[in-house]
Image (tube, rainbow, N blue to C red):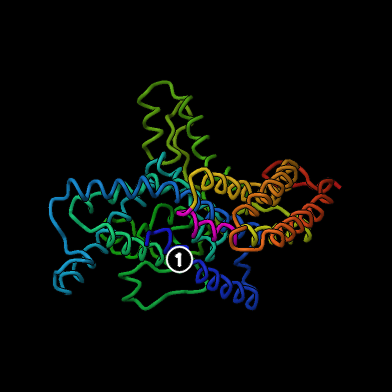
Amino acid sequence: MDKASYIVLAIPVFFLLIGIELLFDRLKKTNYYRFNDAITNLSLGVGSQVFGIFLKLVISLGYLYIYKHYRITDMPGMETDHATLAVVLTFVALFIGVDFFYYWFHRLAHEISVLWGSHVVHHQSEEYNLTVALRQAWLQGAFSWVFYLPLAFLGFDPIMFVVVSQFQTLYQFWIHTKAINKLPHWFEYVFNTPSHHRVHHGVNPKYIDRNHGGTLIIFDRMFGTFQEEEEEVVYGITSQTKSWNPLWVNFNYWGDLFKEVAKASNVSDALKMLVFKPGWRPDYLGGVQPFKEVTPQSFHKYDTAITPGLAYYIFFQFVLMLAGATGYLIAAGGLDWPARIGVALLIILALVTLGGLLEQRRWALFMEVLRLLATAPVAIILLQSIANPIALAIVVTAITLFSIAWLVPYHNKLGTAIGDGHIVANV
């Protein structure tokens, strides 16, 4: 079983825990959740898994090629005749190795501007709850996998690598919460915890670029990037993205970066803008701007307001899309490439149009109607082998027409973004 399949199997657990945290939030009135932010976080998680279907082929082949042709030793694997103790010790060594190389990728993704573009998405949310754990950049895997290749050279079995790296990924889900305060001192000293990771997501100057560990926090302590949680954390990034559109938030940083790079007067400065810390500029382009002190009271979160009816529509369509995307992730290996690509594009289109509706963009309504009309026949074709074709066609057609009838009355209430990204609805 591959890495993506483990994550798909964990989806019910993720949503169960999100539901528990959401219930806690409502009972305690802690306001950890906002509808638009949570939907965007989950949309980005779905998109990252869809992109992962296409990225994992290159990533797997890269690790396998190094392992088969250039490994310098043979570490005990899961299907070898070595003693059980040797396999256990190999798992421990691999666990430490995976976390070590994750630390360095994660740290450099914060300290090298062009790499920051592959990771910034995860930090854009201005809330901190379990949905943020699923908020992942769609192309991060295209950069991060290179950092793990030393493990292939050292002879760590690819199957063991998948198992251990999956454990490390799953571990990081539960630390994205404000519902857990401090844990026992011995645990806080060795492992990454909600407290440590809250610091990592902060835009308070003392918290920026701290606590990069995955499962362990010891590498931050060793390499000088550890910071204890002290003052209340303000979440997000220093330059707010101000969008719920998953496509936009994935690529706008790189677009802005390369626009700035094009202003450089020489190649040296252009390269520095790519590989120095995010925000580095030569003096003639304004230089490096200092971080501003922020507090929860002074920080203005990006927000948009939509009518309850439109919010319910977005939630309804998101649930349908999530069910379809989960089925797609499970069955993608059995689809031919045209179908695999076509369904992926429809899922991405759904994420983009729902994000546009959260921002009350006029174009989103028309794109959503087109998306509904395109999705219906695809769903009928793909599902006809597991359901009665006539009944399926009736149900899908009814849902499509019901959705369009629900959506169209809002066309006069959609507005355009102004100022800092807030929406003024036309009435």
* Residue 219 at least partly seen: no
The residue that label 1 is drawn on is 173
Pick the front one: 376 or 189: 376
Q: Main secondary structure of the magenta part?
A: helix
Q: Is residue 97 left or right of residue 389?
A: left
Q: Which residues are magenta?
A: 322-334
Q: Is residue 293 left or right of residue 424?
A: left
Q: Mark 1, residues whose alpha carbon is within 10 Å: few (<14), some, or many (≥20)?
A: some
Residue 27 in the image: above or below residue 338:
below
Pick the front one: 363 or 257: 363
Quadrant into which the N terminus falls: bottom left
Residue 270 falls inside the magenta stretch: no
Residue 341 in the image: above or below residue 24:
above
Q: Where is residue 164 shown, x and y percent of the image?
A: 31, 64
Residue 327 falls inside the magenta stretch: yes
Q: Is residue 329 left or right of residue 104?
A: right
Pick the front one: 385 or 301: 385
Q: Where is residue 401 shown, x and y percent of the image?
A: 78, 54
Q: Where is residue 412 shown, x and y percent of the image?
A: 84, 46
